[in-house]
Amino acid sequence: MTELNKLTIADARDAMRKGDLTSAELTDACLSEIEGAGALGAFVHNTPDLARQQAAAADVRIKAGDAPDMCGIPLGIKDLFCTKGVPSQAASKILEGFTPEYESTVSQNLLDNGTVMLGKLNMDEFAMGSSNETSCYGNAVNPWRRGNEDTALTPGGSSGGSASAVAADLCLGATGTDTGGSIRQPAAFTGITGIKPTYGRCSRWGVVAFASSLDQAGPMTKSVRDAAIMLEAMCGFDAKDSTSANLAVPNFEAMLTGDIKGKKIGIPKEYHMDGIPAEIEALWTKGTEMLRDAGAEIVDISLPHTKYALPAYYVIAPAEASSNLARYDGVKYGHRAKLEAGDGIDEMYAKTRAEGFGDEVQTRVMVGTYVLSAGFYDAYYNRARRVRALIKKDFDDVFAAGVDAILTPATPSAAFGLGEMADADPVKMYLNDVFTVTVNLAGLPGISIPAGQDANGLPLGLQLIGRPWEEGDLLNIAHEVEARAGFVAKPTKWW
Amino acid sequence: MSIDIETARKVAHLARIKVEDDRLPALAENFNAILGFIEQLNEVDVEGVEPMTSVSPQRLFRREDVVTDGNMPEKILSNAPDAREGFFAVPKVVE
């Protein structure tokens, strides 16, 4: 077998179980790809020794029989997850040198399933960004390019390193996190699959917090089947996260039946937005046809408060961030500014946070502070939370009317050039999440599937939004779109 | 609602982030762009709508109020920029 790193999780699992492949071989193949892929800026802390140890242990377990599906699968882990003994700094200077004494629940669940960690992956600082340009490690780069151009493109964000690594076959899958679209937008920009499960499916314990009422972890993979397999290993009830759902985790892969006859798929009219490129509208129409051909019933629906989702998000997320990021004070971990004679504790806080946080993080923390401050709390924060209730109700009404899933584009454009948005006002960057952010506000599961390419050959994604806790059904519908879209293109290797 | 330089300075202080004077105008401009975007929320009729606190109606998970772990001061202090004699060390707070 050649180029083992290009295998899907499902194929690698089957080959390892048959004895045709060992995790040690697979891990070595990925490690050597990572070594040659520095130009992608995807991996930021490599753990080759740990990976080889874990692979050897996985091989013993597979040989003994009855190993879990994910056993021996080499993965990349987003830098937002705390990993015991391995630097975990949320791509921020303020967490430089931080080496957790504990493992996040999600990454522990993966380890319990026998997975191999190749290293930590690049991202936007504290997951705040849509282009991976706010990282203290520098940009992650999209393995895809426009036609024959050599312009460096963004892999999206915030899970940009995860997307780049999976699309370039540096690992078989990666963890991501999604607060406003941070799994689904980068997945769409790089031609891979990414699912954000229902809020509460994956424990947030040990995942560096950005906006706690919105954050969810999920897998980023090469196929829908892989997403089903990896998601099952990541989620489950966790007493350490009070918002974790005490629900049984189904066998998601077994739910990929290929039968979606009679499923009701909603097409929300508010997602036809001004300025969306014709090729994205066309892809959306094509996706609708695919589902109709598969026997689904297509219905027009309305989600009237869609327009207000981004503004509500840019109150709620910064408000929660300003509170969560108050813990970075130069006392317990990470960076502390050098102090002048006579500086007291207030100067220590203010200097440490000015040196440690990048511009985007500073802006959002201050916006959050402002909207929560005396006199503005009701006008901004409470109003945004009321609008959020209305956004959720839009979805509740549609699902109550019998809709099983909603089909939309994943992003309003294909991947853009790194640096292209540098002079734009911050709101323009925020518009990247226009199709994905409603899903976080309503706590729903959403998946991005690669479904086509633009005129320059760049991948474009479709998004399916499901009912709460029905990731299995959602994955089954996504699997059908994947099969019919037949997206098999890969980026040409230049790195 | 427009944010002036004084308000930007006050917010930076509340957030405990040191912002040099020459950066305040750009910061105020950034705030205004974002707050201008947020102003759209005023178009929505929210009369009688409760502010949402949680996406799922379920009650937060509770457990017995008992000690479940502890006795690991070395681990807790292991990442501190300055730790002495089993404590986090900071500049003098009380005169």
Image: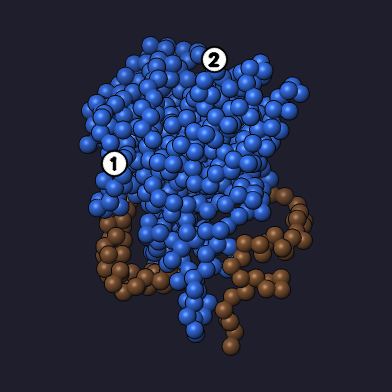
Chain colours: A blue, B brown
> Mark 2 belongs to which subunit?
A
Whether residue B4 can be seen here: yes
> Mark 1 belongs to which subunit?
A
CB within 8 Å, label 2 to label 1? no
- Left or right side of A439 for A307: left
Above or below for A195 versus A311: above
Q: Which is nearer the N-term, disc 2 or disc 1?
A: 2
Q: Position of residue A136 (x, y in %)?
A: 43, 54
Name the residue rendered at 59%, 67% in the picture.
B81
- Left or right side of B21 for A96: right
For the N terminus of chain A, which image quadrant? top right
Q: Which residue type does callout 2 highlight?
A: Thr
Return the residue at label 2.
A257
Name the residue rendered at 27%, 57% in the picture.
B33
Q: Which residue type does callout 1 highlight?
A: Gly
Q: Using a 10 Å C-alpha cutoff, classify the residue at mark 1 as few (fewer than 14 neighbours), some (14 to 19) or many (20 or more).
A: some
Name the residue rendered at 50%, 51% in the picture.
A90
Q: Residue B5: which disc?
A: none
Q: Nearer the viewer, residue A105 or A44?
A: A44
